[in-house]
Image (spheres, rainbow, N blue to C red):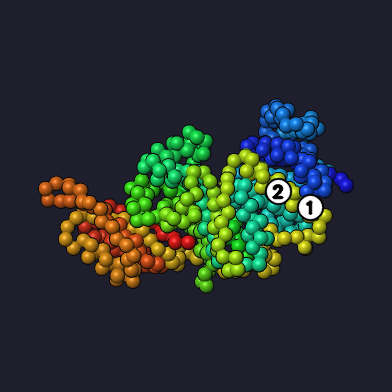
Amino acid sequence: MDSIKIGLLGLGTVGHAVFEVLRRNRKEIQRRVGRYIEITGVAVRNVDRAQALLHSNTTPDADNAQTVRITADPYTIINDPDIDIIIEAIGGIDPAREYVLHALDQGKHVVTANKALLALHGDAIFTKARETGRMVAFEAAVAGGIPIIKVLREGLAGNHIEWIAGIINGTTNFILSQMRDQGVDFATALAQAQRLGYAEADPTFDVEGIDAAHKITLMSAIAFGVPVQFDRAHIEGISGLTARDIRYAEELGYCVKLLGITRRTAEGIELRVHPTLIPARHLLANVDGAMNAVLVQADAVGQTLYYGKGAGGEPTASSVVADVVDVARLHTADPEHRVPHLAFQPESVSDLPILSLDEVVTRYYLRLRVMDHAGVLAEITSILAEHGISIDALLQKEAQTLNELAKETDLIVLTHSTIEEDLNAAVEQMQGLPSVIAPVIRLRLETL
């Protein structure tokens, strides 16, 4: 039987790891697929560097790198009629989108780890794939080496999925772990992450929650059979978090994590990323460092947890190669009988709306910096009661003396479940009190 021939676009951290995993494990992969899988073409900007990388391999019994054609022109690889699968490992939106769409037009299957591309243009790409009868596989786009896409699309296909909550960005999880364990502020923890290679020089996509939002958007579409709607996601990062709030949360029995959350309700779909208090004894609260974890609640199976490395060359390559194996197995299958890209048949995609954050119901942590004098607590509780918000716990810290006549303190309130719109109105009213002397800090709380 003929081998499956692959064209690789990009030879950075992920691309090079994919090349090495395919080469190192080629015999094992062949036993699984029943066909030999080989990379026959690589497109890179720096051809000389790529030649040096591919010839530096020391894996025993590996393929000869000289048999791989290396070019600076991606279209030379994409247009090659002998190539069956294109692996897109260059990242970003453009020109990756153009390459992927062109590859589908050329009759190639596509494997990608590009969550940003799919979160923003997934519907158009999947439509093109259906029109051309090709597959787009993207396991590595969410949570690196954790096979969460296959779980949602196939493993839980017999379930009604209710919600997903995930720690799906290792950079922010490392930073929050450092802030909690060492008591340092955000800037110090970020510098540590950059020094250790967990954070980019420009960490915006990670620390502002954008990367996590790309991933939860894709999971939401697969779990609930709705279009990919990244523009409707609510996104908050961790750059505004303080060590003080992390410490207060601990005192109350909670841990702060950046979570991607999507939930199906009668009114619509929640789709949000934000720092979240979760009970300190919960499994997700104990996912530390740069690790990822995804918790899924479904009707038949209950809760299941998926944990592992969410980034890095070889963990990501593990998922990319798994996709290559799947595509190779289904290479000649009838397109109508393949697993749909987003789990549900295209004509069955739901128009269930994505809820605005004002419509979300959850619990809250509030921290108010207030003047310490009689009646302040009564004012705060009165405003909450006026908006139908009940208090679950209240913590007042020791007062600090400003001068002979004035003291100030932190007042921490945990609420029961309430709608965000009502909480916003209450916070606005509390902010207008003369006794509240700093912006009210608000974090959401989930018991999961």
Q: Secondary structure at mark 2?
A: helix
- Of label 1 and label 2, which has the lower sequence position? 2
Q: Where is residue 56? Give x, y as percent.
A: 70, 27
Residue extending farthest front: 281
Label 1, label 2: how far apart the Cα atoms are: 11 Å
Residue 322: which disc? 2
Looking at the image, do the residues carrying marks 1 and 2 touch, with CB atoms under 8 Å apart?
no
The amino acid marked with disc number 2 is: Ala
Q: Secondary structure at mark 1?
A: helix
Q: Estimate how packed mark 1 is, as few (under 14), some (14 to 19) or many (20 or more) residues with alpha carbons within 10 Å.
A: some
Is 350 placed left or right of 39 in the picture? left
Q: Where is residue 112? Give x, y as percent.
A: 67, 47
Q: Residue at x 17, y 47 (%)?
A: 401
Q: Nearer the viewer, residue 42 or 258?
A: 258
Instruction: Residue 441: name its quadrant.
Output: bottom left
Q: Residue at x 82, y 55 (%)?
A: 332
Is 195 placed left or right of 344 in the picture? left
Q: Residue at x 21, y 61 (%)?
A: 376
Instruction: Residue 150: name its quadrant.
Output: bottom right
Q: Estimate how packed mark 2 is, as few (under 14), some (14 to 19) or many (20 or more) residues with alpha carbons within 10 Å.
A: many
Q: Residue at x 38, y 61 (%)?
A: 364
For label 1, the residue is 329
The amino acid marked with disc number 1 is: Arg
Q: Nearer the viewer, residue 210 or 35?
A: 35
